[in-house]
Image (cartoon, rainbow, N blue to C red):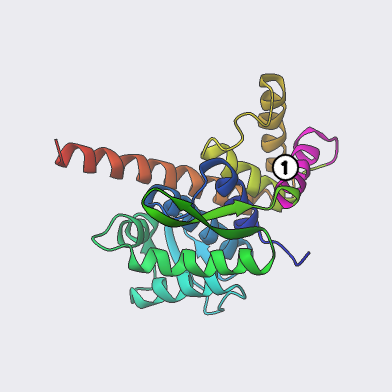
Protein backbone atom coordinates (compact mmCIF):
# COMPACT_ATOMS: atom_id res chain seq x y z
CA UNK A 1 0.00 0.00 0.00
CA UNK A 2 1.26 3.49 -0.84
CA UNK A 3 2.38 5.83 1.93
CA UNK A 4 -0.65 7.08 3.83
CA UNK A 5 -0.46 10.57 5.29
CA UNK A 6 -1.71 11.56 8.73
CA UNK A 7 -4.54 13.50 7.06
CA UNK A 8 -5.58 10.42 5.06
CA UNK A 9 -5.51 8.19 8.15
CA UNK A 10 -7.60 10.75 9.98
CA UNK A 11 -10.04 11.05 7.06
CA UNK A 12 -10.28 7.24 6.86
CA UNK A 13 -11.32 7.07 10.52
CA UNK A 14 -13.74 9.94 9.95
CA UNK A 15 -15.31 8.19 6.95
CA UNK A 16 -15.66 4.95 8.92
CA UNK A 17 -17.49 6.66 11.79
CA UNK A 18 -19.37 9.51 10.10
CA UNK A 19 -19.84 7.88 6.65
CA UNK A 20 -19.01 11.14 4.89
CA UNK A 21 -16.33 13.76 4.28
CA UNK A 22 -18.35 16.55 2.67
CA UNK A 23 -19.68 18.53 5.61
CA UNK A 24 -18.78 21.98 6.91
CA UNK A 25 -17.98 20.85 10.46
CA UNK A 26 -16.09 17.74 9.34
CA UNK A 27 -14.40 19.80 6.64
CA UNK A 28 -13.11 22.20 9.28
CA UNK A 29 -11.40 19.34 11.10
CA UNK A 30 -9.93 18.05 7.85
CA UNK A 31 -8.53 21.51 7.18
CA UNK A 32 -7.08 21.42 10.71
CA UNK A 33 -5.42 18.08 9.95
CA UNK A 34 -3.94 19.43 6.72
CA UNK A 35 -2.64 22.58 8.40
CA UNK A 36 -0.93 20.47 11.08
CA UNK A 37 0.41 18.05 8.46
CA UNK A 38 1.92 20.95 6.51
CA UNK A 39 3.39 22.36 9.70
CA UNK A 40 4.99 19.01 10.41
CA UNK A 41 6.35 18.85 6.84
CA UNK A 42 7.79 22.36 7.05
CA UNK A 43 5.46 23.98 4.50
CA UNK A 44 4.06 26.45 7.00
CA UNK A 45 4.41 27.59 10.59
CA UNK A 46 1.85 28.40 13.25
CA UNK A 47 2.94 31.51 15.10
CA UNK A 48 2.40 32.34 18.74
CA UNK A 49 -0.58 34.46 17.74
CA UNK A 50 -2.40 31.42 16.27
CA UNK A 51 -1.67 32.59 12.75
CA UNK A 52 -0.50 30.61 9.73
CA UNK A 53 2.64 31.71 7.91
CA UNK A 54 3.57 30.00 4.63
CA UNK A 55 7.23 29.08 4.21
CA UNK A 56 7.39 29.24 0.40
CA UNK A 57 7.62 25.46 -0.05
CA UNK A 58 4.60 23.79 -1.64
CA UNK A 59 3.43 20.46 -0.16
CA UNK A 60 3.70 17.21 -2.09
CA UNK A 61 0.08 16.06 -1.75
CA UNK A 62 -2.60 17.43 -4.10
CA UNK A 63 -5.08 18.35 -1.34
CA UNK A 64 -2.35 20.07 0.70
CA UNK A 65 -1.17 21.96 -2.39
CA UNK A 66 -4.72 23.15 -3.03
CA UNK A 67 -5.11 24.35 0.56
CA UNK A 68 -1.66 25.97 0.43
CA UNK A 69 -2.69 27.81 -2.74
CA UNK A 70 -5.96 29.03 -1.20
CA UNK A 71 -4.12 30.36 1.85
CA UNK A 72 -1.57 32.01 -0.44
CA UNK A 73 -4.37 33.70 -2.39
CA UNK A 74 -5.48 35.46 0.79
CA UNK A 75 -2.47 37.67 0.17
CA UNK A 76 -1.17 38.28 3.68
CA UNK A 77 2.13 37.25 5.33
CA UNK A 78 0.28 35.76 8.31
CA UNK A 79 -3.37 34.73 8.45
CA UNK A 80 -5.35 33.80 11.60
CA UNK A 81 -6.58 30.22 11.70
CA UNK A 82 -10.04 31.60 12.37
CA UNK A 83 -10.01 33.52 9.08
CA UNK A 84 -8.98 30.43 7.12
CA UNK A 85 -11.79 28.36 8.63
CA UNK A 86 -14.36 31.11 8.23
CA UNK A 87 -13.49 31.55 4.55
CA UNK A 88 -13.34 27.88 3.62
CA UNK A 89 -15.84 26.22 5.95
CA UNK A 90 -18.33 28.79 7.16
CA UNK A 91 -18.67 31.15 4.22
CA UNK A 92 -21.48 31.55 1.71
CA UNK A 93 -20.06 28.94 -0.68
CA UNK A 94 -18.57 25.47 -0.09
CA UNK A 95 -16.76 25.53 -3.44
CA UNK A 96 -13.24 26.11 -2.13
CA UNK A 97 -13.61 23.66 0.77
CA UNK A 98 -14.95 20.97 -1.54
CA UNK A 99 -12.12 21.57 -4.02
CA UNK A 100 -9.70 20.58 -1.25
CA UNK A 101 -11.74 17.57 -0.12
CA UNK A 102 -12.15 16.43 -3.75
CA UNK A 103 -8.36 16.08 -4.01
CA UNK A 104 -8.16 14.27 -0.67
CA UNK A 105 -10.91 11.88 -1.75
CA UNK A 106 -9.13 11.19 -5.07
CA UNK A 107 -5.89 10.35 -3.27
CA UNK A 108 -7.74 8.00 -0.91
CA UNK A 109 -9.39 6.28 -3.88
CA UNK A 110 -6.03 5.83 -5.59
CA UNK A 111 -4.57 4.29 -2.43
CA UNK A 112 -7.60 1.98 -2.06
CA UNK A 113 -8.52 3.43 1.33
CA UNK A 114 -12.08 4.01 0.17
CA UNK A 115 -14.24 3.09 -2.82
CA UNK A 116 -17.44 4.51 -4.28
CA UNK A 117 -20.51 2.46 -5.11
CA UNK A 118 -23.80 3.42 -6.80
CA UNK A 119 -26.80 2.13 -4.89
CA UNK A 120 -30.41 2.31 -6.05
CA UNK A 121 -33.01 3.82 -3.77
CA UNK A 122 -36.58 5.07 -3.90
CA UNK A 123 -35.48 8.44 -5.24
CA UNK A 124 -32.97 6.99 -7.70
CA UNK A 125 -29.30 6.06 -7.71
CA UNK A 126 -27.01 7.38 -4.98
CA UNK A 127 -23.22 7.23 -4.72
CA UNK A 128 -22.09 5.76 -1.39
CA UNK A 129 -18.61 5.87 0.12
CA UNK A 130 -17.25 2.54 1.32
CA UNK A 131 -14.28 2.26 3.68
CA UNK A 132 -11.59 -0.37 3.09
CA UNK A 133 -12.01 -2.38 6.31
CA UNK A 134 -8.54 -3.86 6.11
CA UNK A 135 -6.95 -0.41 5.81
CA UNK A 136 -9.12 0.96 8.61
CA UNK A 137 -8.31 -1.96 10.93
CA UNK A 138 -4.62 -1.46 10.18
CA UNK A 139 -4.78 2.23 11.16
CA UNK A 140 -6.73 1.47 14.35
CA UNK A 141 -4.24 -1.26 15.23
CA UNK A 142 -1.40 1.19 14.66
CA UNK A 143 -3.03 3.73 17.00
CA UNK A 144 -3.75 1.15 19.69
CA UNK A 145 -0.20 -0.22 19.58
CA UNK A 146 1.23 3.29 19.81
CA UNK A 147 -1.02 4.38 22.66
CA UNK A 148 -1.02 1.18 24.73
CA UNK A 149 2.55 0.11 24.04
CA UNK A 150 5.63 0.90 26.10
CA UNK A 151 7.66 2.70 23.45
CA UNK A 152 7.79 6.47 23.10
CA UNK A 153 5.05 7.52 20.68
CA UNK A 154 6.18 8.86 17.34
CA UNK A 155 5.26 12.42 16.41
CA UNK A 156 2.92 11.16 13.67
CA UNK A 157 0.99 8.97 16.12
CA UNK A 158 0.73 11.77 18.69
CA UNK A 159 -0.68 14.10 16.03
CA UNK A 160 -3.14 11.48 14.76
CA UNK A 161 -4.30 10.46 18.23
CA UNK A 162 -4.70 14.13 19.20
CA UNK A 163 -6.83 14.84 16.11
CA UNK A 164 -9.01 11.77 16.63
CA UNK A 165 -9.39 12.50 20.33
CA UNK A 166 -10.38 16.11 19.67
CA UNK A 167 -13.25 15.04 17.40
CA UNK A 168 -14.40 12.13 19.58
CA UNK A 169 -13.57 9.60 16.86
CA UNK A 170 -11.77 7.34 19.33
CA UNK A 171 -15.05 6.55 21.08
CA UNK A 172 -15.59 2.80 21.16
CA UNK A 173 -11.98 2.05 20.25
CA UNK A 174 -10.59 2.39 23.77
CA UNK A 175 -12.03 1.38 27.13
CA UNK A 176 -12.15 3.96 29.94
CA UNK A 177 -8.95 2.56 31.42
CA UNK A 178 -7.27 2.65 28.02
CA UNK A 179 -8.39 6.26 27.52
CA UNK A 180 -6.64 7.19 30.77
CA UNK A 181 -3.55 5.46 29.44
CA UNK A 182 -3.90 7.42 26.20
CA UNK A 183 -3.95 10.73 28.09
CA UNK A 184 -0.77 9.74 29.89
CA UNK A 185 0.88 8.76 26.61
CA UNK A 186 -0.07 12.03 24.93
CA UNK A 187 1.49 13.91 27.82
CA UNK A 188 4.74 11.96 27.49
CA UNK A 189 5.58 13.70 24.23
CA UNK A 190 6.25 16.93 26.13
CA UNK A 191 9.51 15.43 27.32
CA UNK A 192 10.78 14.38 23.88
CA UNK A 193 12.66 16.29 21.18
CA UNK A 194 9.45 16.56 19.17
CA UNK A 195 7.67 18.20 22.11
CA UNK A 196 7.77 21.80 20.87
CA UNK A 197 6.30 21.03 17.46
CA UNK A 198 3.63 18.70 18.84
CA UNK A 199 2.70 21.28 21.52
CA UNK A 200 2.13 23.82 18.72
CA UNK A 201 0.02 21.24 16.86
CA UNK A 202 -2.06 20.44 19.93
CA UNK A 203 -2.55 24.16 20.59
CA UNK A 204 -3.75 24.45 16.98
CA UNK A 205 -6.24 21.62 17.53
CA UNK A 206 -7.57 23.34 20.66
CA UNK A 207 -7.83 26.62 18.75
CA UNK A 208 -9.69 24.88 15.93
CA UNK A 209 -12.13 23.37 18.42
CA UNK A 210 -12.91 26.74 19.99
CA UNK A 211 -13.31 28.38 16.57
CA UNK A 212 -15.61 25.64 15.27
CA UNK A 213 -17.77 25.63 18.41
CA UNK A 214 -17.91 29.43 18.43
CA UNK A 215 -18.86 29.56 14.75
CA UNK A 216 -21.75 27.13 15.18
CA UNK A 217 -23.00 28.96 18.28
CA UNK A 218 -22.97 32.23 16.31
CA UNK A 219 -24.78 30.65 13.34
CA UNK A 220 -27.42 29.10 15.64
CA UNK A 221 -27.98 32.41 17.46
CA UNK A 222 -28.36 34.29 14.18
CA UNK A 223 -31.05 31.91 12.93
CA UNK A 224 -33.19 31.84 16.08
Of helix, strand and loop, which mostly describes the magenta segment? helix
Question: Is residue 185 one of those drawn in magenta?
Answer: no
Q: Residue at x 29, y 42 (%)?
A: 216
Local packing at callout 1 (Cα closer than 10 Å; few below 14, some 14-19, many 20+) is some
Question: Is residue 145 one of those drawn in magenta?
Answer: yes
User: In the rendering, at what x and y percent does residue 104 appear?
Assistant: 55, 65
Instruction: State how many labels appear.
Output: 1
Farthest residue toward the top? 177
Q: Residue at x 52, y 75 (%)?
A: 65
Q: Residue at x 69, y 66 (%)?
A: 111
Classify 222 as above or below 130. Answer: above
Task: Give the quadrant of residue 220.
Answer: top left
Residue ID for mark 1:
140
User: In the rendering, at what x and y percent does residue 198 appear?
Assistant: 62, 50
Q: Nearer the viewer, residue 99 or 82?
A: 99
Q: Quadrant of the N terminus?
A: bottom right
The residue range painted magenta reads 135-151
User: In the rendering, at what x and y percent does residue 173 appear?
Assistant: 67, 32
In the figure, is residue 133 to the left or right of 20? right
Q: Residue at x 23, y 41 (%)?
A: 218
In the figure, is residue 5 to the left or right of 55? right
User: In the rendering, at what x and y percent does residue 133 appear?
Assistant: 71, 47
In the figure, is residue 23 to the left or right of 8? left
Give SS at disc 1.
helix
Amino acid sequence: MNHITITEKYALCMAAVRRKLYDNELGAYLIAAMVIQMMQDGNLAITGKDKVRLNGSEPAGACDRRLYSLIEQMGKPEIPLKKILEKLCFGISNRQLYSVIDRLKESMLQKNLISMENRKGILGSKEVMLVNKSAYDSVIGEIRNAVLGDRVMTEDMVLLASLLNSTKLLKGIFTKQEKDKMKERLNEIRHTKAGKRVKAAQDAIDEMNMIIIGSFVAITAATT
